[in-house]
Amino acid sequence: MKKTPEEIAADLNDIARRRRRPKPQKDISPTAAGGDVKGLLGRLQRLRAGGNLPEYDYLDLKRQYEQQANIEVRQAQKEAQQKRTERLLAQADLNPEWVFDNMDRDDPVLSHHIDTAHHFINAFDHWEEKGGAAILIYGDFGTGKSTLAGAIAHDLIYQHQKSVIFQQWASVVDRLFFGVIEDQESRNQYRRALEEVDLLVLDEVAANRTRLAESQSSFLGHLLRRRRNLAKSVIIITNHDPQALHRALGDFCFEAIKAFHPVDIALNGPSRRPDIGDYRS
């Protein structure tokens, strides 16, 4: 039956009264809260007494969580180190065969020089504090100069996470003097990398030349002085003995090498390269 206007108005008034009526509030007083906590503890105790709740040793749990966290941290550090090592190896562009394991420690010439190389590696951070160090490796072709320098570079990357650039001097000259790197900004970046890398290895410096072009000698002298100022170390590989290298580079450049007080490593004797066959007709 249809309601009259008076009945509808009464219903609306009744709804409004119910909405205005205050809702019962939960008792959050300390006494009530304490009762809730006691009730919860009581339930936990009953569950534990019934064998439904395992016993936990807080210190043991803490130790387990810390052990797991340490494992995860070490794994993350190992992965980060591996990625950095891969980047450093790509930048260095080293022959993977140039490692100490491939060098003959029974060779009377190599044995002492390998020990010198390890001393250089182990004291590398010390040399950085003292303004950088230098090794001058010289000798005939095939006597193991590049292999020794490459082995040093590999160990510095793997053991100490140091950045390395290994370049033949002819490659440096081509990139900076003969337009192999065409863009000026790219040439500037390459030059800065040569100056700032932790270890710069220059192979075949002045190879087969009695006199280096003045522009190249001047650049090398300035590069070495810049690295000395930045306390960065260098390895120079050449087929010249120090006196012949002095004549080939000139006073300005050779004095820059001497400023490092370099360690001389003379690799003499016959070629240590594997026999690649007899190509005589």
Image (cartoon, helix red, strand yellow):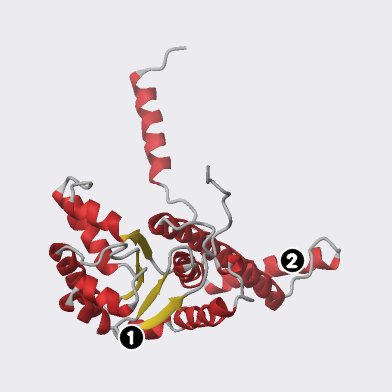
Which is nearer the eye, 258 or 242? 242
User: Mark 1 or mark 2, which is nearer to you?
Assistant: 1
Using the image, determine if residue 129 lies above or below residue 181: below
- The kind of residue tagged 1 is Glu
Residue in the picture at 86% in, 64% down: 50
Using the image, determine if residue 94 lies above or below residue 267: above
Percent position (x, y) of residue 21? 42, 47
Which is nearer the eye, 258 or 133? 258
Residue in the picture at 53% in, 59% down: 79
Percent position (x, y) of residue 6? 35, 23
The residue sitting at the right extreme is 50
Could you tell whether 69 is left or right of 119 in the image? right
Which is nearer the eye, 102 or 206? 206
Q: Which residue is under mark 2?
A: 44
Could you tell whether 18 is left or right of 188 in the image? right
Residue 271's mark?
A: none
The image quadrant that residue 3 belongs to is top left
Percent position (x, y) of residue 209? 26, 63
Helix or strand or loop: what does disc 2 sit on? helix
Q: Which residue is under mark 1?
A: 129
The residue sitting at the top extreme is 1
Percent position (x, y) of residue 16? 37, 38
The image quadrant that residue 49 belongs to is bottom right
Would you call the spot at circle 2 few (<14 residues within 10 Å), some (14-19), or many (20 or more)? some
